[in-house]
Image (cartoon, coloured by chain):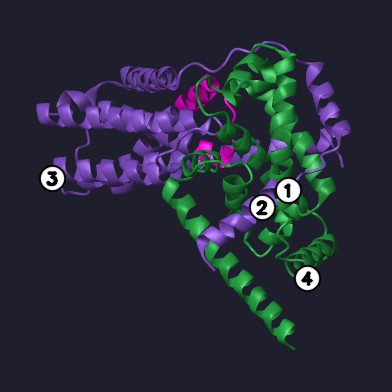
Chain colours: A green, B purple
Amino acid sequence: MHPEDNLETLMALYQQGDFTAAAALIERISPQLHRFFAAQYGSRVDADDLLQDTWLRIHKVRHTYRPGEPALPWFYAIARHVRVDHYRKSMRNSAGEREMEAISRTTVATQPEFGRADNLDALLAPLSESQREIVAMLKVAGMSLEEVARATSSSVGAVKQKAHRAYEKLRKTMSTLALRKGESGLS
Amino acid sequence: MKNEEIDEILNKAARAPLDLEPALLERISGSIQSSLRPVRPLPPAWLMTCGLILICAVVSLGGAARAGFLGVEKMDLLERWLIFPVLGGLAWITGSGFVHEMIPGSRRRVSSGSLLALGCAALFTLFALLFRDYRIDHFFSIGIVCLITGFIHAVPAGLLCWLLLRRGFAVNPVSAGLIAGTLAGLAGVGVLELHCPNFQAVHILVWHTAVVPVSAAAGAFMGWLVRGCSRMRSAQANPD
């Protein structure tokens, strides 16, 4: 009956060496972690790599989860750590590679399909990295403000402020896009 | 555009099915299965905090016992009843912060930088209120000795605290190092308060308080080194 158990129970069983619980966790958490990474990088290959790295890290430090505590912030705190590590590693690349990355990021941010309701990565592209992270946790993982604060090692107030700013930016971009669509429809 | 409309668009996008390759999930399961063994979860946070406080108390008392309890003997009752409980309270808050720093996804009420600022401000205020001798005799020569004495005792306190929490996992080693250094610095101040008989206000305000930020900086530097080493190890393990 493992797949129906909640994450906290599965995590406790995983700590006891139960492979069925570990497999159930992988099946339940991986899609949202993958989407979390994809929303940050917009690259499927990067998201695949980061997901694997995250699970290796989770496995290595699984004893740091304390039974009874919410499991999602624990998963996301580790995922975030892996993402930051990956980001810093990519920052150390050669100047040429960095330029290429900047170009590709600009392309992602200004891609014409922004606003397509089925593409979360494109929707979040205009946001800063920290804002994207917060919105992805709130919307993709369905975490509460308190859980996001735990995962990002910050206060609930700081999370609220970032989410508010992200929504302001999204509102501005979406309104501009809707206006443009309206104008092109008129002409 | 209202927040509810943005919510709706984001929710719709988040609900869109994601075709995650089953082979990827199998690979992850396979890599975990080979090394899956029962593990012992970390002890409760309060127990680890008690351990940290005990380490700091032992280092402070041990250091003062070696150098002499000249400071505490010279203090009046009010000074004794204010300085040591305040030091203990600060050590408890900082120790608890350090424990939470070593547990991913743990609730954090105050950042490590704020804890450092709080510790320094509290000590500075307390010393300013208690000590009124404003002479400055041998300010640098005696002061440097106190700073070094405090720091020398902060180093073993910090290392022992790190050793106690070695099973934890710091998602931000620099922040964890900063808070560990702050805690160790408080142990160093403990040694100085027990030992140093120089009650000149400026001496205590500057040199005793300075032990905390100096050891916090050393801790943050150690955290930075640890982060660099772990990245180097992971780069060697995974060259791509």
Amino acid type, residue under disc 1 in the picture:
Ala
| Label located before the other in sequence (1 or 3) | 1
Mark seen at residue B12: 2
Amino acid type, residue under disc 4 in the picture:
Pro
Q: Is residue B160 above or below residue A76?
A: above
In the image, the segment drawn in magenta is B155-177
| Residue A174 or residue B211, whichever sits in front | A174
Amino acid type, residue under disc 3 in the picture:
Arg
What is the CA distance from the residue labelled 2 to the residue labelled 3?
67 Å
What is the CA distance from the residue labelled 1 to the residue labelled 4?
20 Å
Question: Residue B133 location, x and y as percent?
Answer: 14, 45
Which of the 4 quarters of the picture holds residue A7?
top right
Check if mark 2's residue and mark 1's residue have beta carbons within 8 Å.
yes
Identity of the residue drawn at 75% across and 49% down = A38
* Tag nearer the camera, 1 or 4: 1
Residue assigned mark 4: A112
Chain identity of mark 1 = B
Amino acid type, residue under disc 2 in the picture:
Lys
Identity of the residue drawn at 57% across and 56% down = B7
What is the CA distance from the residue labelled 2 to the residue labelled 1?
6 Å
Chain identity of mark 2 = B
